[in-house]
Image (cartoon, rainbow, N blue to C red):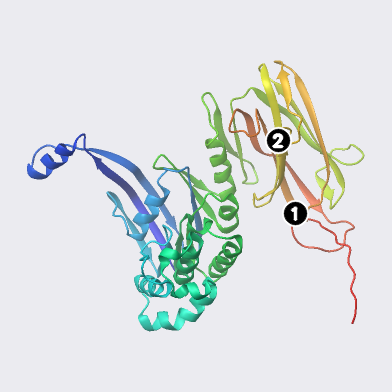
Amino acid sequence: MGTITVTNLGKAYKQYPTRWSRLAEWLIPFSKPRHKLKWVLQDINFKVNPGEAVGIIGINGAGKSTLLKMITGTTQPTTGSVQITGRVAAMLELGMGFHPDFTGRQNAFMAGQLLGMSVEEITALMPEIEAFAEIGDYMDQPVRVYSSGMQMRVAFSVATARRPDVLIVDEALSVGDAFFQHKSFDRIREYRKQGTTLLIVSHDKGAIQSFCDRAILLDSGRLERQGKPEAIMDYYNALIAQKENSILEQATSDDGNVQTTSGTGEVEIESAVILNAKGASVEAVNVGDRITLKITVRSKADLSELVLGYLIKDRLGQPIFGTNTHHLGSPLKLIKIGERVTYQFSFDANMGEGSYSITIALHSSDTHLAANYVWKDRVLIFNIININRKFFTGTAWLPPEWESQNG
């Protein structure tokens, strides 16, 4: 079983005011330093336990790739240390280590040896590597004629040809066709079931929330926070929209769930309820029944435009459906201070059994990134139950009309 322990990790690069300063520092020993340190990561501490899956998120430049390079040993830290137990397979920069003039097969042998496999072991695994990569005759063509997706296919196939104790994956899987992405994630899921420890960097919210037990948010080179994937992704979503005079806070409810609230506060949510077909407020809904989401808001400032959006998420935080009044073609214009607006959205609850939450956002334009008045997760929690529908599984109720013919 593999573990990763990161202790007080930091990385800084030397910055010199002129090229002569660098030369002087080399030629004049024991003189005062002529450089300044530019820290890209500082004071990073966390541990990934055996069999755990941890996702790392953050905006571009937050230090995610640098962190993975230090964990895998391709970059040396300025401060701190990394300890890894078990056999490690890593996919960082796409095709890293591949020689463009060598064939895919030759590069597979080199990459396999870098992962600690013998030539005999790679030879035995080569049929499986070829079959999983599915690039046909290109396996014996120079890598320089490969597309980025083909490079990813070979690199991933080699890295996962045998189950590693620790699998580290950067954004490489975002390259290539959807079919191979599904195939790769299926292999990762299978290895996870068998006990592989996973550390993954991705901007894909769905991947982080479906794969990971925990998420880590990096911001400006520091570990901003860590916790349940849904709570961290909600915080990250609010962080990238944060503007001057806005708030960003998280509160833990009695049931242990985290609610994220952000925004500049020009609008407040007064109430939100789910109504059944008779107009009564309900917390449990039968599969497929007609319901209405009723939301009342009040403006606390004069606004040139007001858009309301809602998002339905399942119990894992995965988005089920979301829209807003901009995309529906009816944003409100010239809202006065103190004005109260009530929205009603009616739809059939064609969802599978389970617990769902509703996120509400009030903003201008098409997204909350322009002007986020208020974004609030888990405003409502409701349950879908199956009272009178035929048995089915999944998060969507899509009853088919069907027939069969013999002969």
Q: Return the residue nearer the eye: 222 or 97.
A: 97
Give above or below for 196 relative to 18: below
User: Total label count?
Assistant: 2
Q: Quadrant of residue 222?
A: top left
Residue 163 visible in the shown view: no
Give the left or right position of residue 274, taking residue 199 as reference.
right
How far across and down, in percent of the image, does residue 393 sit? 77, 62
Q: Is residue 274 above or below residue 138?
A: above
Q: Amino acid at mark 2?
A: Gly
Pointer 1: residues within 10 angstroms few (<14), some, or many (20+)? some
State the residue in front, 131 or 185: 131
Residue at the far right in the pictured view: 278
Q: Residue beneath label 2, please?
A: 309
> Which residue is at a point 36% across and 68% down the rendered structure image?
101
Residue hosting label 1: 354
Marks 1/2: CA distance? Answer: 23 Å
Q: Percent from the top left, x then y, of residue 208?
A: 56, 53
- Image quadrant where residue 97 sits: bottom left
